[in-house]
């Protein structure tokens, strides 16, 4: 281990079904019958908040989950179906006080105006704890729900991630986020007067057209929802290669990445920082979170045996875009600190079995990191931007108007 002081880590948990392992729903702790109830998700987020985590993410998509990355698989032995992530986050928000709530939103085939007001609403009802993880869709079956465009089927063995089609999806996503950000700024912070005596509710001069004209969208604005409490909710994206790295660099506050080891983490961070400079945003903070699938037990042999048993139930070894860690909370703490020294600022952990591995994170890993002085002992801010050390940004239109 390095002799340098341990950097303070940020921790998030990715909530997905009964857990990230496809056989997780068959575990006694899994509660599959409760999966489509609000109480199930409220319990998970309450456990994450008990562990002082920065935020949770909620997975979502425009098609059923599949073992094939770009097509449906027809399987009936794994969890299929989801509740809407944004609506779920809004339902959980009043039941929590501190933790950030970051739903996933597919930005292919959908309209930025709708998402902008949904995330602004989430920020209002949560008191400033909203974010959004933007995601593109490259699945033909999802495009068929909308009928607006034809999507080619990518080769899962050799997808052309730098090709024209994928690059176009991420360029569209960058425009989409630009529209979100402009709409969030389209109301100045003091646009609402609400003066009963004079009968003035709103100062129309403090609502602004955004007049966005791009290749993919033409949006006039303003939003119908007042500026979010954070000014700009946190925008994140998962990125595995150069083209999505560029999206994170251009438009993100936070990027989720999937390194295999510390050297890989160091190289990814360097590539993201270079892309940030190229985007002209070198002076703006950017969090880089490493994603890990985790199976945690007090005995490392028990964690490995549990992974093997789950694989047997699933009928095949589980593979993931992220590294899979099976071991003790202390061993995971060692790994996280090693990767933090390589430049990662935080981690999004994907519990293999939520009912088992989420409590192992909050009641095993978190106390271990606290003992090492590497994680908070209390929530120190009221907003998600505050927890992440991000300033509340000035309104671009107010600055222009008063310049």
Image (cartoon, rainbow, N blue to C red):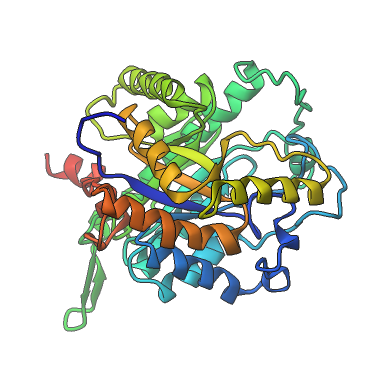
In the picture provided, is 207 more to the left or to the right than 88? Answer: left
Q: How far across and down, in percent of the image, does residue 276 sit?
A: 34, 23
| Point 62% across, 20% down: residue | 161
| Relative depth, front residue between 30 and 189 | 30
| Relative depth, front residue between 292 and 138 | 292
In the picture provided, is 171 more to the left or to the right than 109? Answer: left
**On-image quarter of the C terminus:** top left
Can residue 102 be seen by looking at this rendering?
Answer: no
| Point 43% across, 51% down: residue | 12
In the picture provided, is 243 more to the left or to the right than 21? Answer: left
| Point 36% across, 43% down: residue | 182
When asked about the image quadrant of residue 66, the answer is top right
Name of the residue lying farthest toward the bottom: 197
Q: How far across and down, in percent of the image, does residue 298 sit?
A: 50, 55
When asked about the image quadrant of residue 159, the answer is top right
**On-image quarter of the N terminus:** top left
| Relative depth, front residue between 5 and 279 | 5
| Relative depth, front residue between 383 and 323 | 323
Q: How far across and down, in percent of the image, does residue 309 sit?
A: 74, 50
Q: How far across and down, in percent of the image, does residue 157 sit?
A: 75, 22
Can residue 140 be seen by looking at this rendering?
Answer: yes
């Amino acid at each position: 281990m390095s002799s340098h002081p341990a950097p303070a880590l940020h921790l998030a948990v990715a909530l997905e079904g009964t857990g990230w392992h496809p056989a997780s729903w068959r575990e006694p702790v899994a509660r599959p019958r409760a999966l489509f109830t609000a109480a199930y998700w409220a319990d998970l987020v309450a456990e994450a908040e008990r562990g002082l985590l920065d935020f949770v993410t909620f997975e979502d998509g425009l098609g059923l989950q599949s073992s094939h990355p770009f097509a449906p698989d027809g399987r009936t032995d794994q969890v299929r179906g989801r509740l809407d992530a944004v609506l779920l986050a809004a339902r959980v928000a009043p039941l929590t006080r501190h933790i950030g709530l970051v739903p996933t939103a597919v930005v292919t085939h959908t309209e930025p105006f709708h998402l902008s007001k949904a995330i602004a609403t989430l920020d209002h009802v949560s008191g400033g704890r909203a974010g959004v993880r933007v995601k593109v869709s490259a699945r033909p079956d999802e495009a068929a729900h909308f009928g607006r465009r034809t999507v080619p089927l990518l080769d899962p063995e050799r997808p052309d991630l730098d090709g024209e089609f994928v690059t176009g999806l991420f360029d569209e996503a960058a425009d989409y986020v630009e529209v979100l950000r402009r709409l969030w700024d389209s109301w100045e912070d003091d646009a609402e007067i609400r003066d009963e005596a004079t009968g003035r509710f709103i100062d129309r001069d403090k609502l602004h057209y955004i007049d966005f004209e791009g290749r993919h969208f033409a949006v006039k604005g303003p939003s119908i929802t007042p500026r979010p409490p954070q000014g700009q909710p946190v925008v994140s994206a998962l990125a595995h290669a150069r083209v999505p790295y560029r999206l994170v660099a251009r438009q993100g506050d936070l990027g989720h990445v999937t390194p295999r080891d510390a050297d890989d983490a160091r190289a990814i961070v360097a590539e993201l920082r270079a892309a940030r400079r190229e985007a002209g945003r070198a002076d703006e903070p950017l969090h880089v979170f490493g994603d890990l699938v985790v199976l945690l037990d007090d005995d490392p042999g028990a964690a490995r045996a549990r992974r093997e048993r789950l694989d047997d139930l699933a009928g095949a070894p589980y593979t993931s875009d992220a590294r899979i860690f099976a071991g003790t909370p202390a061993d995971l703490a060692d790994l996280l600190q090693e990767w933090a020294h390589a430049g990662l600022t935080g981690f999004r952990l994907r519990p293999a079995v939520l009912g088992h591995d989420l409590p192992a994170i909050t009641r095993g890993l978190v106390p271990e990191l606290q003992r090492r002085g590497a994680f908070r002992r209390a929530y120190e801010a009221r907003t998600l931007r505050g927890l992440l050390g991000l300033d509340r940004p000035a309104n671009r239109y107010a600055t222009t108007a008063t310049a």
